[in-house]
Image: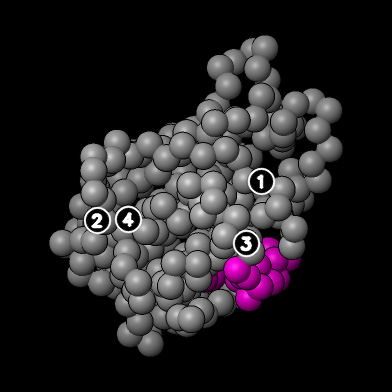
Amino acid sequence: MNKTELYLGGCLEEMDKLIRQNIQVDAIITDPPFNLVGKIGADKMHMFRQGAKCKDSSMTEEKMSFDTGFSQEAWLDRIPKLLKKDGNIIIFNDWENMGDIAKYLRARGIKVKNLNHWQKTNPQPAEWRRRFVGGREYILHAVKGKIVFNVEKLHKGVFEYPLTPQREKKHGKHPNQKPISLMEEIIGILSNKGQIILDPFMGSGTTGVACKNLDREFIGIEMEEEYFKIAEKRINNVDNSEQEQEKSMK
């Protein structure tokens, strides 16, 4: 099994430590805060839930505090020093932030390939009587040099998966938790076995679980102790039954 390193702390400080240690990675695959709470207001937190009667306690103003006041640019300054010359970058984010992120990356010598998306097959029906149901999350793909791109046929950049199943939240959950199968497809395309993947916003550790399943090395950073402990437990307890369940769904 390949090496996994998990760091509890702020992404900027921990990324700077990696830079000082001259550590470079083959891919950065991450899901930073979107600043959605600041945009829509804390009083509209219910929009994240599956309907007005949902009692999802992970969507409280207190638990979503990590999403407020976050700089979408500061962490991007570290990418050129952390990413190997032939590295891939995947950034999940809100569509409103993607233009600024793309411009910021280009200004630092990073080539932006395209904007892809995760098409949710069972999106949350919040406020469905007043708006079209938001059924996708956007994924920016950027690169540095010649990259790994493991495809055998045309890939349209559309990743179709349902919302994260409850069985993947048995150790605890994160409000923006991604399904393991989604992350496995992305990691499988953009890296090879034994390569190093960095997730500076690890959350509940889904990227790390997918890396462990696919024999990639993983470096994860998370500032919230609650989510760090969930990620640590999930990654350290990857078992054959969970891997087989995921493979059977493909």
In the image, 182: left or right of 36? left
N-terminal of the two: label 4 or label 1?
1
Front: mark 2 or 3: 3
Q: Given the image, on which type of amino acid does mark 3 rest?
A: Glu
The reply to whether dot 4 and dot 2 touch (C-beta < 8 Å) is yes
Report helix, strand or loop for mark 2: loop
N-terminal of the two: label 1 or label 2?
2
244 is higher (above) or lower (below) than 117: below
How packed mark 1 is, by other alpha carbons closer than 10 Å (few <14, some 14-19, many 20 or more), is few
Q: Does residue 236 show up magenta in the picture?
A: yes
Rounded to the nearest whole Å, what is the CA distance between mark 1 and mark 2?
A: 28 Å
How packed mark 2 is, by other alpha carbons closer than 10 Å (few <14, some 14-19, many 20 or more), is some
N-terminal of the two: label 4 or label 3?
4
The magenta stretch spans which residues? 220-240
Q: Given the image, on which type of amino acid does mark 2 rest?
A: Phe
N-terminal of the two: label 4 or label 2?
2
Coordinates of residue 241 in the picture (x, y in percent) = 64, 64
| Residue under pointer 1 | 165
Which disc is residue 54 wearing?
none
Q: Residue at x 25, y 72 (%)?
A: 84
How packed mark 4 is, by other alpha carbons closer than 10 Å (few <14, some 14-19, many 20 or more), is few
| Residue under pointer 3 | 242
Q: Residue at x 74, y 43 (%)?
A: 59
